[in-house]
Image (spheres, helix red, strand yellow):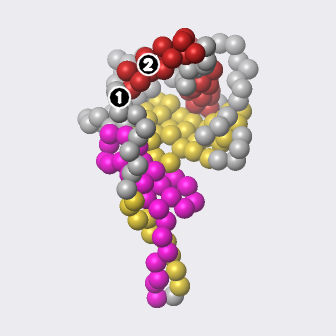
Amino acid sequence: GGDVKAILGTATRRERKQLRVEDTAFALIQLKNGIDGALVCDELTEHYRIEIELTFQHAVIRLGGGLGEGTWISQPRAVEKGWWYELVKEEMPEPAWKEVRQVRAARDLVECIQKDRQPRANGYDGRAAVEMIMAIYESQRRGNQWVELPLTRPERMIDVLRKEGFF
């Protein structure tokens, strides 16, 4: 989606006290390019479900092993006093890869070494993901206020939250 501008989030440990981190996390994400996103992470469910849902003005794309993958396109539908739009399921295109994620990642790493190129997911991507998590923690610490990125606090936010009694 692009670089993150700011995050407003919450991370709480509600039930699983034996965990040293949160069991639920929610965040609103503002990207520098004007796109907004939302994150819901809940470890309190009894079922395994990992999904990514991308909602656009005219379409929805859902990926993951949860309630179903697919692409839905907005289509106009006549109603009594005008028009409204409904999402109509479209065929999901086959992915360009057929391998398991770990095999694909290993193959990418070998190709990077052979062709002297950067991997698809590099250390900068990993650092950005960790910074987003730390921004959610900082937002929690500030009483769920927006946090601008990049973060400037030198301590690890998880340590700060533990010290202040959040976890």
Judge by depth and name the residue closer to the eye, 126 or 70: 70
x and y, in percent, of residue 50 in the image? 37, 36
Q: Nearer the viewer, residue 166 or 54?
A: 54
Q: Main secondary structure of the magenta part?
A: strand
Residue 3 occupies quadrant: top right
22 lies left or right of 32: left
On the image, numbered disc 1 is attached to which residue?
A: 99
C-alpha separation, residue under disc 2 versus residue under disc 1:
10 Å
Disc 1, SS: loop
Q: Looking at the image, can residue 42 be seen?
A: no
Say above or below: 132 vs 145: above
**Location of residue 16 in the rendering, given as x and y in whole percent from the top left corner:** 34, 25
Q: Is residue 131 magenta?
A: no
Outermost residue, left side: 46
- Residue range in magenta is 55-80
Residue shown at the point (43%, 38%) measured from the top left: 96
- Asked which secondary structure carries label 2, the reply is helix
**Viewer-proximal residue, 52 or 102?**
102
Residue located beneath label 2 in the image: 107
Query: Does residue 165 appear left or right of residue 141 in this picture?
Result: left
Residue sitting at x 41%, y 24%: 104
Q: Looking at the picture, which amino acid does disc 1 mark? A: Glu
Q: Are marks 2 and 1 in contact (CB under 8 Å)?
A: yes
The residue type indicated by label 2 comes to Arg
Q: In the image, what residue occupies the spot 46% across and 46% down? A: 53
Q: Which image quadrant: the N terminus?
A: top right
